[in-house]
Amino acid sequence: MAGHSKWKTIKRAKAATDKKRGSLFTRLIREITMAAKLGGGDPSGNPRLRTAIDNAKAVSMPKDNIERGIKKGTGELEGVDYTEVLYEAYGPGGVAIMIQALTDNPTRTVADVRHKLSRNNGNMGTSNSVAFMFDRKGQMTVSAEGVNEDALIEAALEAGADDVVREDEQFTITTDPGSLHAVKEGLELKKYKVEEAELAWVPKNTVKVEGENATNLLKLLEALEELDDVQKVDANFEMDEDAMAED
């Protein structure tokens, strides 16, 4: 399975604790704040903000938290001034990694990322050293339970999606970045429940990792995700189910 979705599957299995929930809330609020800063505080005219709010509501974030995040982005409340940064790296087995962060101190963040990479058999790449291996896409997931695959594919393509793939117990729907929210709304109008929607770096090709490389790669990806400033990690790997279970 492609690295993007496989890593998401692993993360869901690891995200049950309160600590993980608190970290998720922090990431979502930062994304809401940045989206409001860049595109304004009205979600009806700001697709990125609409998506961020939807993702926050999906994990039961309180309305007050969402509203404060928006107001910090628009300047109505005092808040931290975040900058978007993107790092490119290599992990065990030659896996390419894209690391997205929102930070108030890029110097601190790059040092933290370098430290995690060096401690976990990875290394930082230069600009565009791995980005050319990925496409920027919108992605969303729909649970496969009770869903007719042909009907979902027809509805997704009609709404403007590029592709629909079943992966384990869910469907992953891929779109052009600018069509993400329109496709999501189109599916919801037809009563499909979109569990998550986001912009992602989707690998053009994948690298198979096994054994020690697989174990070390998962440790590295988890270490990167645990950094407060890191919003999202995408990678171009495949691995067998047993390697996942061992982790």
Image (spheres, rainbow, N blue to C red):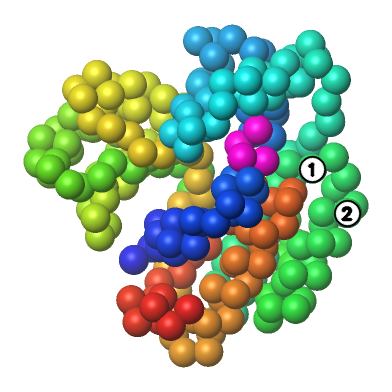
Residue at the spot x=48%, y=37% of the render? 59
Where, by quadrant of the figure, is residue 104 drawn? top right
Q: Which mark is residue 103?
A: 1
Question: Can you see residue 201?
Answer: yes
Residue 67 to residue 111: above or below: above
Question: Can you see residue 204?
Answer: no
Residue at the spot x=48%, y=78% of the render? 247
Query: Horizontal placement of 190 versus 97: left or right?
Result: left
Where, by quadrant of the figure, is residue 241 drawn? bottom left
Q: Are marks 1 and 2 in contact (CB under 8 Å)?
A: yes
Residue at the spot x=33%, y=34% of the render? 194
Q: Position of residue 119 (x, y in %)?
A: 75, 78
Query: How many residues crowd around disc 2 within 10 Å: few (fewer than 14), some, or many (20 or more)?
Result: few
Query: In the image shown, does 25 or 107 lie closer to the viewer?
Result: 25
Residue furthest to the front in view is 18
Where, by quadrant of the figure, is residue 148 drawn? top left
Tell me where the magenta segment starts and ends, as one range.
25-29
Query: Horizontal placement of 110 versus 55: left or right?
Result: right
Q: Amino acid at mark 2?
A: Arg
Could you tell me which secondary element the residue under label 2 belongs to? helix
Q: Which mark is residue 192?
A: none
Could you tell me which secondary element the residue under label 1 belongs to? strand
Which residue matches tag 2? 108
N-terminal of the pair, mark 1 or mark 2, is 1
| Membership of 239 in magenta stretch | no
Query: Horizontal placement of 135 versus 189: left or right?
Result: right
Q: Position of residue 6 (x, y in %)?
A: 40, 63
The quarter of the rendered structure image containing the N terminus is: bottom left
Predominant SS of the magenta segment: helix
